[in-house]
Amino acid sequence: MDIGFIGLGNMGRGMVQSLLRAGHRVVVWNRTPERADELVALGAERAATPFEAAEVGVVFTMLADDAATEAVVAGPHGILAGLPRDGIHVASSTLSVRYSAELAERHRTRGQHYVAAPVFGRPDAAAQGALRLVIAGQPGAIARLQPAFAALGSQQFVIGERPEHAHAVKIAGNFLILSLVELLSEAFVLADKAGVSRERFFEVASAVFSSPLADRYGRALLEQRFQPPGFRLTLGLKDIRLALELAEATHTPLPIADLVHQHALEAMARGQAELDFTSLLRVVEAHAGLHRPE
């Protein structure tokens, strides 16, 4: 299958590696061209513009946010201009529900398809082809994408035909993850201040409340693995803002999201922008009077 791929950050690089390993032809573009060098050495082709990446007929985007996506979608060198009629744009980024719906309409008016396929999983899962994909769009377009989806993920969830619904699921899921980091941080600090070692608390918690997500993030918090970031604090802050934006649009109170948002802002003010989101623990510790060396 011929695939264009735009966005070669930690997640995008891993996804391209999985596509190449499965034998797909992949044409890549990134705003910082040198990020493509490693992938070109593995067999990817380099596009000069997003237009060229989209020309192949199927193009994935894996970018930081709405603004970064719009920068490669619009204009004479963008995806909308380059994607042929009946071509497919697959948005795997975490986008706002509003913008995802807008993209669907813009592609529809050009005779193009738009499929939302945001993913759950960290960079290691992307490189292993073990992501979980949340998919929404026209059934025919989704069927055409199955060879690519099979290379990228271990599990697929088809939500329906409205692409923005896949992004709503992704936003709600990320809200759950970010809230879990907050709750685990508070629980670790509570046990610590009561005189119980965090290791002993985690031993009990991981046995009684075992889940892959809690185990992964609990271990990361216990070991304070904040670098290299699998999910940067800046991206977590963006995602909690998306949850609050959706909450406002749907008149849904999210008091936990408000708290996580404030703690994420505090972490940014402390200079933690490029650390993993689990570094939120440092804010919780500081509020409890535990001041550890940075």
Image (cartoon, helix red, strand yellow):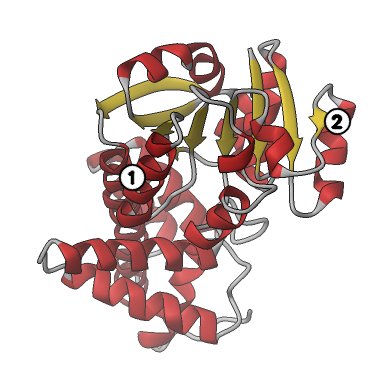
- Point out the tag, 1 or 2, that comes first from the N-terminus: 2
Amino acid type at mark 1: His
Q: Residue at x 70, y 34 (%)?
A: 53
SS at circle 2: helix
Q: Residues within 10 Å of mark 2 (few under 14, many from 20)?
A: some
> Who is closer to the viewer here, 207 or 141?
141
Q: Amino acid at mark 2?
A: Val
Q: Residue at x 25, y 41 (%)?
A: 165
**Residue nearest the observer in this picture, 285 or 37:** 37
Q: Quadrant of residue 117?
A: top left
Query: In the rendered image, which quarter contains the N terminus?
Result: top right
Residue 37, placed above or below residue 43 = below
Distance between the Cα atoms at labels 1 and 2?
Answer: 30 Å
Label 1 crowd (10 A; few <14 / some 14-19 / many >=20): many
Q: Is residue 68 left or right of residue 95?
A: right
Could you tell me residue 37's position as x and y percent?
A: 88, 39
Q: Which quadrant is home to the C terminus?
A: bottom right
Residue underneath mark 2: 40
Across and down, in percent, residue 92 comes to 48, 39
Tag 1 residue:
167
Q: In the rendered view, would you say 178 is above or below 244?
A: above
* Circle on res. 282: none
Residue at 45% from the left image edge and 70% from the top image edge: 280
